[in-house]
Image: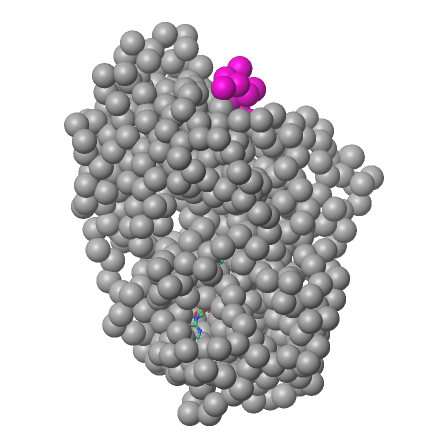
């Protein structure tokens, strides 16, 4: 559909009113408090369905570097440190193997939603060619294991282990680490890379504790109940079952096509529809891959994607997918403005026009796929595309044409009640055998709640105390008062959420560079300078309050569930000039040699 044709038919004012109406329906005063934290009676929802816990003796030794988290963050940091000659590295991981997200999330259809060529870290170093443009979960999990094997990270890792306390011992200049497995060991350096979305949550639906049937969260898929496996074997166990899936976010979008095929009846409980654009997944051709995989290829691909996706600068688009198309269309719309009308207001209006057109196309796509017109109408997303994680799928909408699949739209209100035998939507009771909670993960809850420990730095000050008024870091990586500790995450750094691993590989490289310098200087302690940290937070604060997609967005985890942002949430922002500028800045900082803002002492 040519954009021009659509543009003339989009009634922008009517659309804005519709967006505001839909937002108002979904808005609720309890924000993040609407969700149930998985502790006490809910703790069993966190149990590991994949691997049994192996007995082992507690550790009481010393390591050079201890890293909390065995997902991409811990793996890439370990790899970069090994490359720099630092081999005494220990990962502490709550799962039974490496993989993080990919260890836990083994639901049917799990797949990366940014291209494998940039999503899967260290492809060049490991020599792995992804088999598909968007690889499926088992391949990504195996890649994590590959990194673990290649960099010999398995030898010293503590699996099925959770850190309970992390305390800086100033006299000895080491971190003291205690775990739920009785370990109490020391480390010269620590890294924290527990991930942005690793703590599952349940919806606080009245009566949820009464349900007598089977239920589980998507991140703990129970294959023993559903039958089948994550390699694609059919879920025979659901043949005669009535299954409800609660939630229609990025996870549910990948699962629903599989449940629709397997279950006797599938109820898809929707509060806010996701936007579903074309996926166009395809196998990667080994001949093509051999041609492009010349030295430095993955860095070029990463830089191309980041530049194209964030409109950082004009660079050839190597990835060419829905993410970069989004930005290309905005750029094209803005460039249609006559030179003398290139004001910030006009540019924002052009961006808005481009968004209206794109979303209109996505809504029209629903009509072309979903046969039942009432269902199609309810599957349409009425908000700007970046208000929620944009989804791309070529079988999700089609699933609603399966005879056993029923969309239970809650008109923004959520499931009303859960009973002993089923769910209530719009006053009607539906009996079900199984409820799958695709209700997402904690975002915006305090660091110590999500991680189960609160690092204690110099003078007994905990991180939550130090961050009482919001996050404070240098480059998102180092914190004054928390020497020799590194945060491997994206806030107060690039904050590049459409390809999160890019943040992690950069952080891994920065840590390895800093530690190499520390060895050179024979320094025992590295710490962010207070003035430098304040200056950095000052830069970040310029961006603070910017919500992805804007303040008129439908509520969700992107925007603090539609609640006003307090100072804590406001400072969890990115570098104001964007990811490309941040990655350039940090590369220059790493190579300048003076490590401005960090103090090295022996
Ligand atoms: P989300 O938080 O995106 O979705 C949770 C869903 O549960 C929403 O649809 C939400 O509705 C719904 N919900 C919550 N409470 C209720 C209720 N009371 N009644 C009915 N519905 C309810 O979680 P996901 O696990 O889907 O995705 C989280 C993130 O994980 C994604 O945004 C993405 O970043 C990442 N992800 C990445 C993938 C990849 O391939 N790389 C794949 C899957 C996920 P509402 O929208 O109204 O809040």
Query: Residue furthest toward the right?
Result: 287
**Closer to us: 31 or 216:** 216
By what rule are the colours in the image chosen?
one colour
Task: Give the quarter of the figure containing the N terminus.
Answer: bottom right
Q: Position of residue 434 (x, y in %)?
A: 56, 75
**Closer to us: 480 or 552:** 480
Residue 12 is one of the magenta-drawn residues: no
The answer to whether residue 369 is left or right of residue 214 is: right
The answer to whether residue 85 is left or right of residue 510 is: right
Residue 96, visible in the rendered structure: yes
Q: Is residue 320 above or below residue 225?
A: above
Q: Magenta segment, which residues? A: 79-88
Q: Is residue 488 above or below residue 205?
A: above
Residue at x-position 23% and y-position 20%: 170
Residue 22 figure quarter: bottom left
Q: Position of residue 301 (x, y in %)?
A: 61, 38
């Amino acid at each position: 559909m040519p954009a021009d044709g659509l543009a003339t038919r989009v009634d922008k004012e009517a659309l804005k009113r519709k967006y505001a109406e839909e937002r108002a329906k979904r808005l609720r005063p309890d924000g993040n408090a609407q969700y149930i934290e998985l502790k006490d009676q809910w703790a069993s929802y966190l149990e590991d369905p994949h691997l049994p816990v192996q007995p082992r003796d507690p550790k009481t030794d010393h390591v050079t570097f201890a890293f909390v988290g065995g997902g991409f963050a811990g793996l890439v940091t370990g790899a970069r440190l090994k490359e720099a000659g630092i081999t005494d590295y220990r990962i502490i991981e709550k799962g039974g193997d490496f993989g993080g997200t990919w260890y836990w999330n083994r639901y049917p259809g799990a797949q990366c939603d940014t291209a494998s060529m940039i999503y899967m870290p260290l492809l060049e170093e490991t020599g792995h060619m992804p088999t598909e443009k968007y690889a499926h979960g088992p391949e990504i999990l195996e890649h994590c294991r590959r990194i673990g094997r290649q960099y010999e990270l398995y030898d010293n890792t503590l699996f099925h282990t959770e850190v309970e306390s992390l305390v800086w011992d100033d006299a000895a200049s080491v971190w003291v680490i205690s775990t739920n497995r009785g370990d109490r060991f020391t480390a010269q350096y620590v890294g924290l890379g527990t991930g942005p979305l690793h703590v599952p949550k349940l919806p606080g639906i009245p009566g949820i504790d009464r349900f007598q049937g089977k239920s589980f969260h998507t991140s703990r898929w129970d294959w023993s109940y559903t039958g089948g496996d994550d390699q694609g074997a059919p879920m025979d166990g659901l043949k005669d079952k009535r299954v409800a899936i609660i939630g229609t976010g990025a996870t549910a979008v990948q699962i629903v096509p599989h449940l629709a095929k397997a279950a006797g009846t599938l109820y898809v409980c929707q509060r806010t529809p996701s936007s579903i654009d074309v996926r166009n997944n395809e196998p990667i051709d080994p001949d093509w891959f051999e041609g492009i995989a010349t030295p430095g290829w993955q860095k070029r691909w990463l830089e191309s994607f980041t530049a194209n996706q964030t409109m950082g600068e004009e660079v050839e688009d190597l990835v060419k997918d829905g993410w970069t198309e989004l930005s290309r269309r905005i750029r094209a719309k803005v460039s249609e403005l006559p030179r003398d009308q290139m004001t910030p207001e006009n540019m924002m209006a052009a961006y808005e026009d481009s968004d209206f057109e794109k979303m209109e196309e996505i809504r029209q796509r629903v009509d072309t796929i979903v046969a039942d017109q009432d269902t199609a109408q309810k599957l349409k997303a009425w908000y700007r595309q970046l208000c929620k994680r944009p989804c791309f799928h070529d079988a999700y909408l089609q699933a609603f044409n399966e005879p056993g699949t029923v969309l239970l739209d809650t008109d923004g209100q959520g499931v009303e009640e859960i009973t002993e035998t089923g769910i209530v939507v719009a006053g009607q009771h539906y009996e079900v055998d199984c409820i799958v909670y695709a209700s997402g993960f904690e975002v915006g809850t305090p660091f110590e709640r999500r991680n189960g420990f609160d690092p204690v730095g110099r003078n007994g000050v905990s991180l939550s105390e130090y961050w009482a008024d919001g996050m404070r870091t240098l480059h998102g990586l180092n914190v004054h008062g928390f020497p020799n500790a590194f945060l491997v995450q994206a806030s107060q750094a690039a904050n590049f959420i459409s390809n999160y691993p890019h943040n992690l590989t950069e952080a891994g490289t920065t840590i390895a560079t800093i530690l190499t310098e520390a060895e050179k200087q024979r320094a025992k302690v590295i710490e962010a300078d207070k003035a430098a940290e304040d200056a950095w937070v000052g830069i970040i604060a310029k961006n603070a309050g910017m919500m992805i997609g804007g303040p008129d967005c439908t509520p969700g985890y992107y925007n603090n569930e539609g609640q006003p942002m307090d100072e804590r949430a406001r400072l969890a922002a990115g570098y104001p000039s964007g990811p490309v500028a941040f990655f350039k800045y940090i590369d220059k900082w790493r190579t300048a040699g003076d490590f401005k803002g960090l103090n090295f002492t022996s």
